[in-house]
Amino acid sequence: MPHDGPSVARATVPRRFATADGRGAFLEGDNVAGLDELLRDGSGSVTLAYLDPPFDTGRVFETQGRLAVDGVSVAYDDRWSDRAAWLEALASRLTRIRELLAPHGSVVVHVDSRTSHYVKVLMDELFGEENFASEIIWRYRRWPSKTRNYQRVHDVMLRYRKDARVEGRWNPLYEDLAPSTKATWGTRKQKAVVDATGKRVRSMSEDQESKGVPMGDVWDIGVVAPVARERTGYPSQKPEALLNRLITGLSNEGDLVIDPYAGSGTTAAVAWKLGRRFVTMDSGEASREVVRARLGAIGAELLDDPREEISKDPRKEVAA
């Protein structure tokens, strides 16, 4: 049945799974309780928080194939009494994440074009307009639908800094040079030659190879194809290429990345491969099973109820 709002009062201590080396954890249960547990461990420890919440679609999403649990194929229920209840639930999570973020940290909220403007206003209020960093458009291709309108082929990711006055995590990413640029100038760096007045008169090639064009805020990345190897059967699964770009650009090796809506476990899998620590959480059995299987396949087996402290940076422990 439709949700009435955040489940703060009903939140219970989540069941905990963690990797043997303490570099990652999955908390099974209400993500409000999961975030509260992280707050008890200490605020200010998270470099990147990525949220891919329900989109307020009014639908019940089902798993596919082997992910059905005890004959039930529901992955998550995205029905709400009204949009205010959906926004209130999201706000309760974002308020906690704001406290968890390190001063150099970022939060990225992944929504669609129907709700992005509501979420933008909400995040302006919670994080401050001055901490808005970017609106990233994820453009993808999919089977066209029958509609007397332009095809919807993008999602929106809103990025906010914890504190814009602090130098944040930032690893520049680059896109390939345009074919026309390569045809004219090759793959070497270009340098502008100016006259005495500062006016550009020509360009010249340098000996150093170009890294490419600095990454823009419109990303063309394909959705997970039905026959792709990374396909899990969990609905609304996001491609690893998308999370790879976010985690690489906005965190360093050893940093802590969290995702309170684990879903298919893409954030956890990519964070592990990139040498980040992670905490992810979800209340669904289907999510738990697919995340455990997905992480186990890459050597990050989740063990039942160990108590490693994920909030500590293992590099600092070794240095000490």
Image (spheres, rainbow, N blue to C red):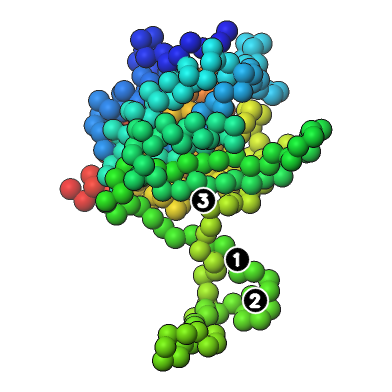
Q: In the image, which is nearer the foreground, mark 2 or mark 3?
A: 2
Please tell me how crowded label 2 is: few (under 14), some (14-19), or many (20+) other residues with Cα within 10 Å.
few
On screen, residue 33 above or below 192: above
- For this orientation, the residue located farthest to the left is 320
The answer to whether marks 2 and 3 mark residues whose Cβ atoms lie closer than 8 Å is: no
CA separation in Å, label 2 and label 3:
24 Å
Q: Give residue 245's mark.
A: 3
* Dot 2 or dot 3, earlier in sequence: 2
Residue at the (52%, 80%) spot, across then down:
190
Of 11 and 67, nearer the camera is 11
Hey, what amino acid is under mark 3? Arg
CA separation in Å, label 3 and label 1:
14 Å
Please tell me how crowded label 1 is: few (under 14), some (14-19), or many (20+) other residues with Cα within 10 Å.
few
Residue at the (40%, 35%) spot, across then down:
123
Task: Tell me if 102 is positioned left or right of 243 in this view.
Answer: left
Task: Tell me if 287 is positioned left or right of 95 in this view.
Answer: right
- For this orientation, the residue located farthest to the front is 197
On screen, residue 92 above or below 279: above
Element class at badge 2: helix
CA separation in Å, label 1 and label 2:
10 Å
Hey, what amino acid is under mark 1? Asp
Q: Give residue 182's mark.
A: 2
The answer to whether marks 1 and 2 mark residues whose Cβ atoms lie closer than 8 Å is: no
